[in-house]
Image: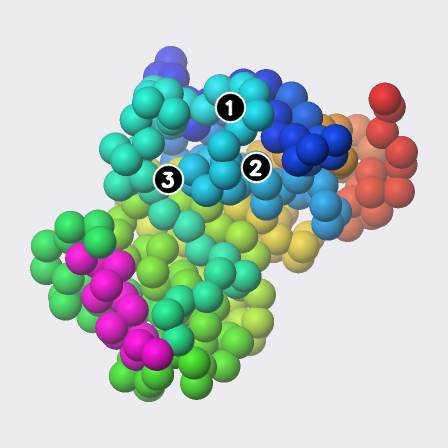
């Protein structure tokens, strides 16, 4: 069996006396969508930031594509991308200019044709030439997704990828993610507070609470363990249960 695309071992991050991530270990296989669940402050964003090299772990190891992240950071990040509704793009540029900058930063060929394709697939034609600061929240979300898909990454982190989208565009976005996964073997780390979406999109789910993994498995397996018919009820039960010291 091929080794996982992403391997995380005993990942820890401390900020002074506060431990945001506490000895987390998991793998993500090629083509898998791994859901990362947990209440606010559970360590999800901190974990993603360490996987993207935005902050440095206090302890532990990250390997992506079989390579130690700390020694192959630039090589790995050239094949990775992310989307988050909480990260803004340069406000004075148009949508197309922002995407063109991203393409150049990644050293892409055929940038215009790639932008044409992504803009069409995310139904962004009507605001392609619009100044970014004038975008609605839903349009900003689509721009963030376009930036993530543009570079054809092998590993993609999606943080609340359908937040602010109307139901129609959200459904089309989920379908696009699944289509790209099927056609390219894309590996995805997926976070959302939409439990229905997490069940639909995730092959497996990891539940974080206070920086530790407290549940892991398919959504059906996790629901069975906790005796609940709905993932949201599991979320509430785990979020309201004090973890063991």
Residue drawn at x 49%, y 20% is 61
Q: Which residue is mark 2?
A: 47
Residue drawn at x 86%, y 23% is 244
The answer for how far apart the CA atoms under marks 2 and 1 are is 10 Å
Q: Quadrant of the N terminus?
A: top left
Q: Are marks 2 and 1 in contact (CB under 8 Å)?
A: yes
* Residue 8 badge: 1
Q: Quadrant of the C terminus?
A: top right
Describe residue 220's horizontal placement relative to residue 84 as left or right.
right
Q: Which numbered disc, 2 or 1, marks the residue that appears first in the sequence?
A: 1
Residue nearest the observer in this picture, 100 or 167 = 100
Q: What is the secondary structure assignment of the residue under circle 3?
A: strand
| Residue 52 visible in the snapshot | yes
Q: Which numbered disc, 1 or 3, marks the residue that appears first in the sequence?
A: 1
Residue drawn at x 14%, y 67% is 112
Q: Residues within 10 Å of mark 3 (few under 14, many from 20)?
A: many
Q: Quadrant of residue 99?
A: bottom left
| Number of marks | 3
Vertical placement of residue 30 versus 132, above or below: above
Range covered by the magenta-colored residues: 92-104
Vertical placement of residue 152 versus 115, above or below: above
Q: Residue furthest left?
A: 110
């Amino acid at each position: 069996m091929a080794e996982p695309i992403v391997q995380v071992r005993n990942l820890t991050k401390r900020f002074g006396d506060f431990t945001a991530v506490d000895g987390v270990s998991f793998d993500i296989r090629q083509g898998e969508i791994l859901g990362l669940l947990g209440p606010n402050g559970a360590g999800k964003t901190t974990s993603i930031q360490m996987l993207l090299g935005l902050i440095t772990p206090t302890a532990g190891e990250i390997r992506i594509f079989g390579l130690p992240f700390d020694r192959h950071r630039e090589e790995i990040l050239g094949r990775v991308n992310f989307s988050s509704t909480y990260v803004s793009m340069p406000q004075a540029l148009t949508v197309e200019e922002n995407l063109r900058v991203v393409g150049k930063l990644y050293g892409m060929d055929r940038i215009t044709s790639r932008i044409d394709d992504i803009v069409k697939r995310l139904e962004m034609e009507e605001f392609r030439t619009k100044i970014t600061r004038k975008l609605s929240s839903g349009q900003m979300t689509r721009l963030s997704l376009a930036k993530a898909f543009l570079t054809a990454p092998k590993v993609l982190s999606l943080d609340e990828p359908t937040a602010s989208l109307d139901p129609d565009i959200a459904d089309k976005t989920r379908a696009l993610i699944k289509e790209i996964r099927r056609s390219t073997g894309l590996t995805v780390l997926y976070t959302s507070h939409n439990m229905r979406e997490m069940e639909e999109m995730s092959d497996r789910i990891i539940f974080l609470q206070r920086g530790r993994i407290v549940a892991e498995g398919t959504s059906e397996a996790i629901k069975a363990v906790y005796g609940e018919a709905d993932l949201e009820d599991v979320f509430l039960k785990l979020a309201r249960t004090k973890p063991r010291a």
